[in-house]
Amino acid sequence: MERRAQWLRGVLDLCVLGALARGESYGYEIAQRLEHGGLGTIAGGTLYPALLRLERLGLLATDWRAGSGGPPRKYYRLSDEGAATLRSAGTDWAAFVGNVNTFLEVP
Amino acid sequence: MTVDDWLAALAAELRRRRVDPAGPVGEAAAHLRDSGRPPLLAFGPPVAYAAAIVDSLRGATLELRRPPSGEVRLRATKITKRYGRSTVLDGVDLSVRAGEVVALIGANGSGKSTMLRICAGLLSPDSGRVELSGTVGYCPQDGGTADFLTADEHFMLVGAGRGSSRAAARAQGRAAAAALDWPGAERAGEARHLSGGTRQKLNLVLGQLGDPDVLLLDEPYQGFDNGTYLDFWQQVWRLRDAGKAIVVVTHRLSELERADTVLDLTPGGPR
């Protein structure tokens, strides 16, 4: 479990970008998407700082909207730059995983 | 800790760090409502979460530092000071404008406190001159308080020396103390019964009494806990925004981004 948490730390921002490539969303729903995708529970204390960082880097655009009957929520969506980052990082990640897999295969 | 308590604590911690709490607190509130999880499990302690948010925003808070634009309030020119054969200050220049915070840094023994005392007029330089425009408040590193006086008595005594009425000095002192997370100053007993950190708060409050135009602060936060330390910088920024010229002697390098200008007194260092 500890190792998984460490892995996730390295790729959480990319997973968030990927989750938002499936459509704009707000914090809790992003956490749900990641959890349903098999990444386990993402604590708010981890998720929101990552979202802030991505927003500051210009990879996410945001706006506050009143929900239907609920409290106002901050919605996030990919900026053009965020989409470009996701594509290039996705390629890098696939290459990296391929290399790791090669080492993990016991000859 | 209830959800409301946790959110209030988070808002206070963010304010202390000069971050507008509205966004992060609103988002955390919505998340807690949606997830139904207890705040300490979802976000951890308010202090740690506030620190994580500030980390994420780092680089986005450049407006803290800005070019000085007010008139020069303090100008020290070619200050030299020797003790016996050792030259502590060798031709040091320092100028501070209204609305500017200067951090005075340097290795131990590089003359930081000496320079500040010369600027305050408490010590004469061997050569060089100090020009001041306006009134001066000085906060020594320690020893600025009297053991057998209460906080209120300090306020009134120092206030009287700066031309304030007793009531005005008391009110100003208590307000400045509250801004340093010391709300009970009026109930405080004699200074000798105060903790080191609280005495230092008193010391710092006394330096600002009478609303001086130039503030000279010599490592004024020793013994402060981290929260008070952040409050201290908030107060410094508030005073700067009110047009004060401020010099802070410090040995903490992490502080430099909080000041507008840095003067390094380390021999051979950049001047």
Image: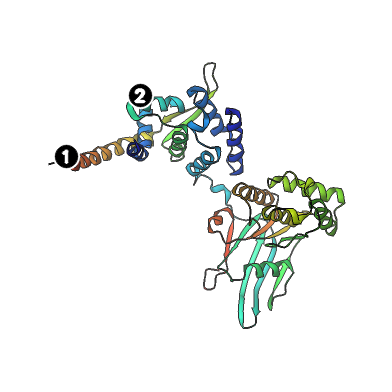
The location of residue B126, given as percent across then percent down, is 69, 79
> Foreground residue, B231 or A65?
B231
Q: Secondary structure at mark 2?
A: helix
Residue in the foreground of this view, choosing between B113 and B147: B147
Question: Where's residue B180, x and y in %?
Answer: 68, 47
Quadrant containing the N terminus of chain B in the rendered view: top right
* Upstream in sequence: badge 2 or badge 1: 2
Q: CA distance from mark 2 to mark 1?
A: 28 Å
Q: Quadrant of residue B183?
A: top right
Rendered location of residue B231, percent (x, y): 64, 47
Say if B60 sits above or below B78 in the image: above
For residue B227, say whether it is visible.
yes
- Image location (x, y in percent) of residue B117: 70, 68
The residue indicated by pointer 2 is A36
Kindly indicate the quadrant of the structure image that contains residue A41: top left
Mark toward the viewer: 2 or 1: 1
The chain carrying label 2 is A
Which residue is disc 1 drawn over? A105
Quarter that holds the C terminus of chain B: bottom right
Q: Are marks 2 and 1 on the same chain?
A: yes
Residue B93 appears left or right of B124: left
Task: For label 2, count other residues whose C-alpha is less than 10 Å away and answer few (under 14), some (14-19) or many (20+).
Answer: few
Q: How many marks?
A: 2
Reply above or below: B117 against B80. Answer: above
Is residue B205 among the parts visible in the rendering?
no
Badge 1 amino acid: Glu
Residue B3 location, quadrant: top right
The chain carrying label 1 is: A
Q: Residue furthest bottom?
A: B85
Query: Between residues B159 and A87, which one lies in front from this camera angle?
Result: B159
